[in-house]
Amino acid sequence: MRGKLALRVGLVILAVDKQMSRFFVGVSADSLRKLRQHVVDQLCEASGGPCYYFGRSMKTVHAGLGITESDWQITVKHLTATMDKFKVPDKERNEILTLFASLKSDIVEKS
Ligand code: HEM
């Protein structure tokens, strides 16, 4: 539960980060909500359910965005800082970090 809350907050922080905001220019509040829900569903499914992820594959959805290693590092930094803030327990923290790590090669295009 805390993990999900942290993820929601983390995504909001990401949208206002100076380097990262370029990815969210012109995206409506409702589309951001949809994106956030997709990520929550994916995480929920990966950690045993009962949710299902109905979104597109990570490779398809991020192709062409030009996400760099530096963007990735910033994302992980915000994620861990937000999980610290919400005192996410180690088990959930590790599940989230493991999921992120497993998706990296489908998301990052440039080094
Ligand atoms: C540097 C890191 C990332 C950036 C800059 C980024 C950026 C974006 C952007 C701009 C979109 C919208 C694309 C579109 O609808 O045309 C998107 C979609 C999405 N991203 Fe990411 N993303 C990142 C990492 C991640 C990670 C780590 C996850 C999973 C934990 C994730 C999950 C998703 C999902 C589920 C969608 C929507 C899928 C769908 O609409 O079917 N992203 N991302």
Image (cartoon, rainbow, N blue to C red):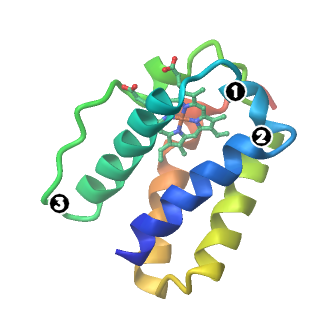
> Which of the labelled discs sits on residue 49, or is there none?
3
Q: In this view, does 2 lie to the left or right of 26?
A: left
Q: Are marks 3 and 1 in contact (CB under 8 Å)?
A: no
x and y, in percent, of residue 86 in the image: 56, 81
Ligand 1 within 8 Å of disc 2? The answer is: yes
What residue lies at 17% left-to-right and 52% top-to-bottom?
51
Residue at 42 percent across and 77 percent down: it is 2
Q: How many labels does the image show?
A: 3
Q: Is residue 6 left or right of residue 91?
A: right
Q: Find out whether the residues at labels 1 and 2 contact each other: C-beta distance under 8 Å.
A: yes
Q: Quick one: quadrant of the C terminus?
A: top right
Write down the residue under mark 2. 71
Do the numbered discs 2 and 3 sit on residues whose CB atoms are within 8 Å?
no
Mark 3 vs mark 1: in front: 1
Expressed as whole percent of the image width and height from the top left, the position of residue 96 reads 46, 64
Dot 2: element:
helix
Residue at the spot of label 1: 23
- Ligand 1: does it lie within 8 Å of the C-beta at label 1? yes
| Horizontal arrangement in the rendering, residue 4 relative to residue 64 (left or right) | left
